[in-house]
Image: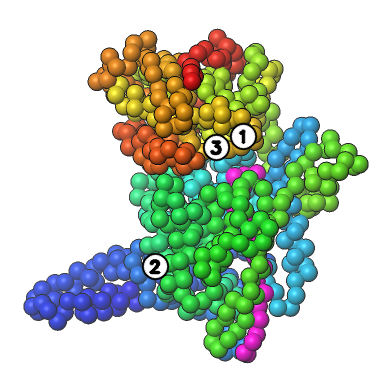
Amino acid sequence: MYGLFKAWRRFRRGVAASVSPAVFLGGALLVFVLAAAGWCGELVLSPFSGTSGKGFDEVYVVDGDTLSPAERVTGPIPEGLASFRGEGERLVLTVFHFNDLHHHITVPHKTRGNTHFLAQMVRQVREARAAKGADEAVLFLSAGDDHTGTPFDELLGGNGAEFKVDPVYRAYSAANLDAAVIGNHDLDKGTEILAKGIAQDVRFPVLSANLHGSAVLRPGQIHRALLGVVRGYRVGIVGLTTTNSPKQPEDPGFRITPPLEALQHLLPALEPLCDVVILLTHVGYEDEPAIYGDESDRFLARKARELTSKPVLVVGAHSHSVLNEKGLEVREGDVPILQGGQRGQFLGKSRLDLVRSGDTMHLANAEAFLVPLKKRDDRVAADNPDYGRFEHDGDYDEVFEKSTVDPLFALLSEKMSETLGAVTVDGLDADRTLVERYTGECALANFMNEAIVRRAVTFSEKPVDLALINASGVIAGVDKGSLAYSDWYAVMPFADTLQVGEMTGAQIRDMVVNNAKRIIRPDEAAGMDLKNTYVGRGFLHFSGALRYTIRLGRDAGETVAENITLHGKPIEEQLDRVFTVVFNSYIGNGGGDSCWNGKKIPDIAAEVTGFDIGSLPKIDTGLIYRNEIIADIRTQGGIDAAKGAALDGRVTLVP
């Protein structure tokens, strides 16, 4: 009803004085109809029904419309500090945070031993909560991209019928997490599986203020924000998700609006209820239009400061940035911005000293740093000087590991131990593959592209002329010998789907010419540890029907592609011909480093703009890329040179 009143008041103020009575009445009726349909923002606060983590005494969640401005939040509003706190009262807010864990709950290794990333965090948070002072609150937050990246993904299944468990959300619930925001990779498996995971395994608020229109995610599964009460103080946490997220063809109404739009509509209404505001974001740190548009953490921090006078903290993700490693160095004005790398690199820890002055709290001091999480290597002896750098028993919460994570591994073990076939050739190991993927032809990428061309008869109406994959789609190698499901999962853990599109010969030529400029040149490679370095230029690998020469020149600006042939004929003779191409959804949907679709490519001195594959007409098959490769491996009995796992000269480098 309040929404109807707001709609009426806006209409009356805006137009009533300047129109005829008939137009006025007709317009008023339209306003009431639109308001009843949800046109006006309506935000409702309600007690959280789950058993949230131990950071708050009470937890309320904010639900409702953030597509239009809301003037207030309705519901059972908790009493504020003004009524019972005195001048100079103090709250120490300690925030433990991590981001982009990508299902790296525990990472097994048969020789080094298992690394217990999440259990290490749980131990530190548990100890901090046990030792906190009377004026201290300890929060534990995830900034998203919790899914996609290890064999645990398989427990989610490929569709709703195959769903077993959401491993990371079940583990977070047991870890007493206080809140998580939705990241782009949390949507990789689709809204149906995400909804099942939240319904079955989540006991904490999952947040995003800018997700809308899903016919699958039920009301109340993803909240706009939360209001947590601790010692009478009220902490508002707003979740924001990047628009650079997977499309949802099975949920066509689902959409993600720009984060700022939701923040502008939500924060003014929520702000009066908060003593401090945390933006829990998955949008990326830098003001780099080529990656994140204008709505980065830095940008949102500036805008939040315009929307509220309360202390603001940004806990971010998505760009995998390592911020404040040695202390708080990253602020936007007076707003600290936090982020802790990726895949279990760090547990972030910040401390905010909040002091009451008048009717508000002020940020008297802020500290932040990153706690490195240790990797396991049981081969390192106790007398080794580096012994303390590695994880050992006692560094993690063993009770949590045994009660929560071990049962997840038990569910997974049968699937991961399955033998797919045999690798019969050398040269596909990680030491070679992780360098080759950036510097020229890559034997393992060759095999993957040929496998997709072979599998295309099962999903493409037309014969496929060309398959391609980005370098960062190959993140490990395989050794000669028996190949288990888990071995191949390590090569391509992401849940990309296959997309089929069409390109003219002219477009293929332009793509190849552009691709040549994105190679890591020999002079660059000499100074880089490519086996342990992620490079986001988006160098592409092609199936064997395409062959070309890269003439390096003095720099990337002078680098050109020559002698391009497709199916044995010069591409210049086929510029008008239309070819069928297959690529992964990361490329097709314009993933950041997939090809830098129409955007300036970073880390290249020359001004190079990526070829825009993302704008090509295409059909998403819905088939998981990894699963199609696995099907080919099973059909072939393994991986061998005769099936494409070799260097055949399809790319030649000359000075």
Residue drawn 80% across the image and 51% down it: 395
Q: Work out whether residue 181 can be spotted.
A: no
**Compared to 466, does 77 lie above or below?**
below
User: In this image, 354 relative to 75: left or right?
Assistant: right
User: Reading the chain from its start, which is encountered first: label 2 or label 3?
Assistant: 2
Q: Quadrant of residue 80?
A: bottom right
Where, by quadrant of the figure, is residue 275 drawn?
A: bottom right
Q: Is residue 617 visible?
A: yes
Secondary structure beneath dot 1 equals loop
Q: SS at mark 3?
A: loop
Identify the magenta region: 86-104
At label 2, the amino acid type is Gln
Q: CA distance from mark 2 to mark 1?
A: 43 Å
Q: Which class describes the residues within 10 Å of circle 2: few (<14), some (14-19), or many (20+)?
A: some
Q: CA distance from mark 1 to mark 3?
A: 10 Å
Task: Classify residue 526 as left or right of residue 648.
Answer: right
Give the residue pinned by disc 3.
Answer: 535
> Mark 2 falls on what kind of element?
helix
How packed is label 3: few (under 14 Cα within 10 Å), some, or many (20 or more)?
A: some
- The disc at residue 264 is 2
Disc 1 marks which amino acid? Answer: Met
* Callout 1–callout 3 Cβ contact below 8 Å: yes
Q: Which of the two discs, 2 and 1, labels the residue nearer the N terminus?
A: 2
Say whether disc 1 or disc 3 marks the residue closer to the N-terminus: 1
Type of the residue with mark 3 = Val
> In the image, is residue 566 part of the stretch drawn in magenta?
no
Q: CA distance from mark 2 to mark 3?
A: 35 Å
Residue drawn where x is 31% and y is 27% of the image:
507
* Residue of label 1: 528
Please provide percent x and percent y for residue 191: 46, 47
**Image point 51% across, 45% down: which residue?**
185
